[in-house]
Amino acid sequence: MRRLLTVSLLATALLGPVAHASDTDQPDSAEKRLRGCLAAGASTAPKVSLASAVQHVRALCGPQIGDVSEERVSAATKGLSGDEAEEAKARTIRELNNEIAFAIANFTGLTQ
């Protein structure tokens, strides 16, 4: 258990500075940072259930998830307003959440 915590803290320390890189990065750098965080987080996630692994990794990768969500929602709602914008935002967030869960399932090998 102590080793698991050490690995988790090390991954967080190594990925932390990257999570707040400047806005002059390449457009897809937020996606790359998120994927790296998901992979690192999945390696330290509890292997009890997919739900617990997803909860663990989402807590660890919150800033990266927020960055990607913000970019995707902005692109999806560009030029839309009102109900159309809200629907596009909700759909985009659902799609990202599904991608995150799928990635964690692949990285951990958990199915449920």
Image (cartoon, rainbow, N blue to C red):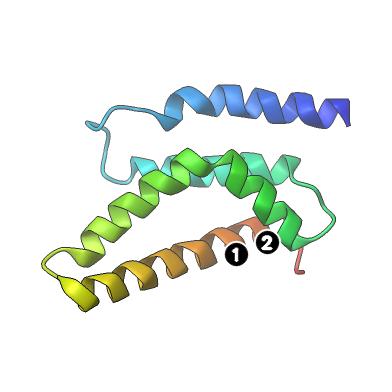
Task: Using the rendered view, name the quadrant where residue 25 is placed.
Answer: top left
Per the image, the residue denoted by label 2 is 105
**Circle 1 residues within 10 Å: few <14, some 14–19, many ≥20:** some
**Circle 2 residues within 10 Å: few <14, some 14–19, many ≥20:** some
Per the image, the residue denoted by label 1 is 102
Q: Is residue 65 visible?
A: yes
**Three-letter code for the amino acid on which mark 2 is drawn:** Ala
Q: Residue at (38%, 54%) from the top-left corner? A: 69
CB within 8 Å, label 1 to label 2: yes
Task: Using the rendered view, name the quadrant where residue 78 is placed.
Answer: bottom left
**Quarter that holds the C terminus:** bottom right
x then y, percent, for residue 24: 22, 31
x then y, percent, for residue 76: 25, 65
* SS type, badge 1: helix
x then y, percent, for residue 48: 85, 56
Residue 74, relative to residue 38: is it above or below? Answer: below
